[in-house]
Amino acid sequence: MAEPQKAYSYRADPAVPAFDDSRALFVFDGVCVLCSGGASWLMRLDRKRRVNLTSAQGALGQALYRHYNMQMDDSYLLIDGGRAYTASAGYLHLCTILGGAWHVLRIAGLIPAPVRDWCYDQIARNRYRWFGKADYCALLSDEQRSRLIS
């Protein structure tokens, strides 16, 4: 992200469609096999539905990327408490949101952020080459697709 945003700044942006932000929102690349597979996995494990999901290709996802002055290839977006998280910090925050055994994974926070983010960037930059592309949200079941915020 170019510069820090105020919490809930997207609410004042007429280009961002209104959405339920009472829960965290995970914005993922809907054509990336790794990303869609990860979203499917997250939906299966998030039985308490603490996290809403939407694709970066949808109107809401595109508007949020524009609002935060980001390109979809830069990172996914995790919006929680009106703030955006990306890259490794976003995954660490996601572990906090999910709670329970997920807190254990926060130990990765001991790794310096530049190292964590370098690893994240390598995977993000090569995700299509290493994992491929699929039709839009093809790895999601019909029930999972119905859970996406559009």
Image (cartoon, grey):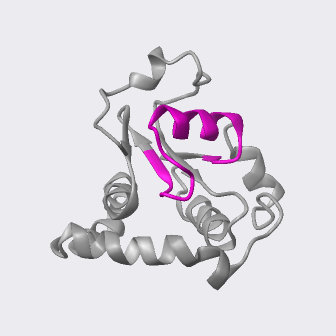
**x 70%, y 45%: residue:** 147
Left or right, 114 with respect to 146, comes to left
Residue 68 location (% of width, % of height): 44, 37
- The answer to whether residue 3 is above or below residue 123 is above
- The answer to whether residue 48 is above or below residue 120 is above
User: Where's the C terminus, which quadrant?
Assistant: top right
User: Toward the viewer: 120 or 104?
Assistant: 120
Left or right, 23 with respect to 101, comes to right
User: Toward the viewer: 63 or 108?
Assistant: 63
Left or right, 140 with respect to 72, comes to right
Q: Residue furthest bottom?
A: 130
The quarter holding residue 36 reads: bottom right
The quarter holding residue 101 reads: bottom left
Residue 56 location (% of width, % of height): 63, 48
How many numbered discs, if any?
0
- The answer to whether residue 122 is above or below residue 86 is below
**x 37%, y 78%: residue:** 119
Task: Give, as a single range, the part of the protein colored magenta.
Answer: 54-78
Residue 67 location (% of width, % of height): 49, 31
Asked whether 70 falls inside the magenta stretch, the response is yes
**x 37%, y 45%: residue:** 1
User: Toward the viewer: 66 or 29?
Assistant: 66
**x 42%, y 71%: residue:** 121
User: Toward the viewer: 133 or 24?
Assistant: 133
Asked whether 35 falls inside the magenta stretch, the response is no
Residue 45 location (% of width, % of height): 54, 64
